[in-house]
Amino acid sequence: MPPKPAKKSSTTNKKEKIFHPSSRKAGQLARKALRKEKLQNLASKRTQKQGSTADFFGFFYHAIPEEGALTLEELHGIIRDVWLTRHDKELEEERAARRKGRPKSTREVHLEDLKMRETELYRTGMEVVDLTHEPTVELFRQWDQKEVAYLDLLRFIRIFSNDPARVIVSRPGKHALIVSSTAKDATVTAVDDTTMAIDEAPAT
């Protein structure tokens, strides 16, 4: 009996539907999922080094996009969906392991307090490297992930969970590339085809 070509065709078609290297949307989704997974894995492996400056900015270093800069919305998404939730799995495990009626473990209390503090910091204004600013992103890519003093060359912004469109330039950056681009930024920048005012933090 001759083979049934329909099955081969079906298998081929199925493979073609799964792999679409030229599909822009598929590529975007894959990169987004990969970056989120990488950030979550990175955060989970650095539990013992929590709180260090290099550790905090190392997380955002790995959030740098492959090309260009992030949008403000994407930056908020990384903080909201990855940074603030990085200990959620461990917290759930601590809660599941606790018997009914037993007090919380020291670790559970610590994780809850940490998340509460970071959530409040994000609400009132969290300072991060400005990953929406291309000159800053390009310089950040050159960081060795060790030298904290290098970070002073970069531009920092303060963003707020309760007012996502608000951005305050908390540290304008000292590198020549950033200084030369400041005049072009002026006081208004475009983010996803919407304009938002950029406040300048008062000089100290």
Image (cartoon, helix red, strand yellow):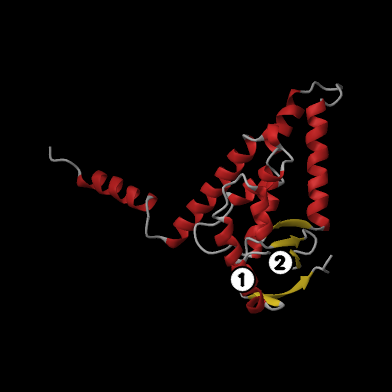
Question: Is 62 above or below relative to 96?
Answer: below
- Residue 38 placement (x, y as % from top left): 55, 43
Q: Which of 23 and 72 is in front in this view?
A: 72
- Location of mark 2 (residue): 172
Residue at 83 percent across and 38 percent down: it is 113
**Left-right relation of 136 to 52:** left
Say which of marks 1 and 2 sits in front. Answer: 2
Under mark 1, the amino acid is Asp
- Which secondary structure lies at badge 2? loop
| Quadrant of the drawing holding the N terminus | top left
Q: Are marks 1 and 2 in contact (CB under 8 Å)?
A: no
Q: Is residue 34 above or below residue 156?
A: above
Q: Name the quadrant containing residue 204.
A: bottom right
Report which residue position mark 1 lands on: 192
Between the residue at mark 1 and the residue at mark 2, the CA separation in whole angstroms equals 22 Å
**In the image, residue 142 lies at what x, y percent?**
54, 54
Q: What residue type is labelled 2?
A: Pro
Looking at the image, which is closer to me, 31 or 23? 31
